Amino acid sequence: MFDLKFGIIGLLSDAGAVVLFVLAILLLFSIVSWAIIAFKFGYIRKSLKESKAFLDYFFEVYSVDKAFTKSEEYKSGSLARIFRSGYIEYRSFDGKGDSRHSRARIALAIKREANAENKRLASLVPFLATVGNTAPFIGLFGTVWGIMTSFHAIGFTQSASLAVVAPGISEALIATAAGLAAAIPAVMGYNYLTQKIGVIERDIEEFASDFVDAFFNEP
Amino acid sequence: MKKVQRVHSEKTFYFWLTIAAILHLVVFSVSLFLQILDARRQVEPKIVSITLVSLPTEESVSAIEVKPSATKAGLPPAAPVSLPSPAEKRVKAVSSTPLPAKLKAVTRALPEKKPVPTSAKKQDLARALERLKEVVGNKAQPPQPPGSTVKTALAELEKRVNSEKALAVSGGSGERAGVSSGNRVAGKEYGGSGASLAYKKRIAAIIQDNWDLANPLLKNSFGMSVAVRITILSDGSIGQILFVKKSLSEYLNNSVKKALEKSSPLPPLPRGEGAQGVWVAFVFTPEGIEQ
């Protein structure tokens, strides 16, 4: 029969309390990281797709009313959202007041929405950076602690043969392995998401002024 | 509106969190399953056996040469330590019934002999007897130390008579494992490998019980063996541990040493087994372990 003492279960059962605690933290980190990666991947992908579709439509019709109606279909698109906030501000004047003042108010509303959108896009992503940076160190801490206790135990056995030393070190190293397993996807996900968020942010920055102009230069 | 969107995004995030947790569980289960599958693919470890053999001392060899019936005496002293092939061991494991499951107390494995015609066999026996007689003749006339007297010669004769009587009393050599007992020729109560088979089985079982060998080592120590010769004193304590053949694995060597140390004191020697102790040899082999 298979002896579980030499498998993953064996490594975990022989590990100390600190190592187990470290492993639990790393497991939690890993689960949350993957959840963030999956959630953000879907969110950003949808945002990019809808923003592109909205921009195509916007430059096609060049009518703020039609664009606003169409933007209701792109609720996840960042650019569509920003346009909507500008349009709402534009309609609140309803042709009254100074156009210069109105322009400044619309620009402000668009900027505010752009900031909110940037925050939305970047939310949870720093956690990936935190995991990517700290998980290996947390794992290393578990390993150091495990080796420390292992050597302490070896001192009692009064034997320094490889067969006595190796199991303890092997058990301790699982913490480093877990740390790396949590950190590597987190770092990869962080880099990918940051790059995509950067693309959206540049789009917002670029098209925000076009939206403001569109409200006052309507054909 | 924004609140609704936030709630929706939170729900989505929790959904992905659950999926991630499930995926981690699945990955863990799969890795565990693969590990079990991999372990099952490997050949299951077989029992660890201790092969118990007797090492003849120089004296006992000479004693055996006197007795034509002790045919095994012709082997060199190192022969008992030689390890049988795994196939031989398996055969022995099947055939040896009275021993503990993991342990075999055996005499030396003799090479298979080809059938020889009886007439040739008789001639060979006659020649062997003649040779033995010559050897006995030579030994019966040891170089007399200068100044030896008739009294010393008589004393020696008495000793020889006594030793022959003792041999007759202690039973036939068939009851002995390996070689016959006693080194009375030399005038010493060595006992050699004269411990009875029952006693050997008993001590082998004790040592086997005390032999703690970690399984990971077994995976890596295929073909390794440790041959040890120990002196059992009359009170059962182990007087000396001599490694005849060491394994490459220090851990295996240590485990054997520890097992022997742990087993000491062994049961006292049976009466008449040797006042000064007996030599018993063991071969510790992690047999049949395949990676």
Image (cartoon, coloured by chain):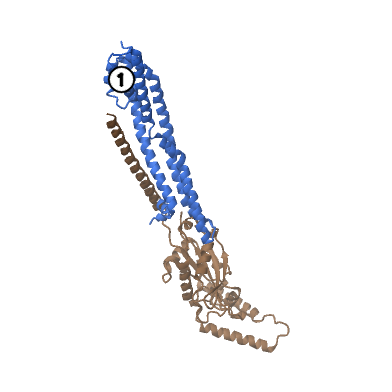
Chain colours: A blue, B brown
Q: Is residue B245 left or right of residue A183?
A: right
- Picture coordinates of residue A164 (x, y %)? 51, 57
Whether residue B138 appears in this view of the structure is yes
Q: Residue furthest front?
A: A97
Residue B153 location, quadrant: bottom right
- Picture coordinates of residue B79 (x, y %)? 56, 67
Residue A154 or B190: which is nearer the viewer? Answer: A154
Looking at the rendering, in which quadrant would you find the C terminus of chain A? top left
**Amino acid type at image mark 1:** Glu
Q: Residue furthest right?
A: B146
- Picture coordinates of residue A175 (x, y %)? 45, 47
Whether residue B225 appears in this view of the structure is no
Residue A6 or A43: which is nearer the viewer? Answer: A43
- Which residue in the structure is indicated by mark 1? A89
- Picture coordinates of residue A71 (x, y %)? 29, 22
Chain under label 1? A
Q: Is residue B58 above or below residue A76?
A: below
Mark 1: secondary structure = helix
Q: Is residue A63 above or below residue B142?
A: above
Residue located at (53% from left, 79% from top):
B273
Crowding at dot 1, Cα within 10 Å, few <14 / some 14-19 / many 20+, comes out as: some
> What is the count of numbered marks?
1
Q: Residue furthest top?
A: A219
Q: Is residue A65 left or right of residue B262?
A: left
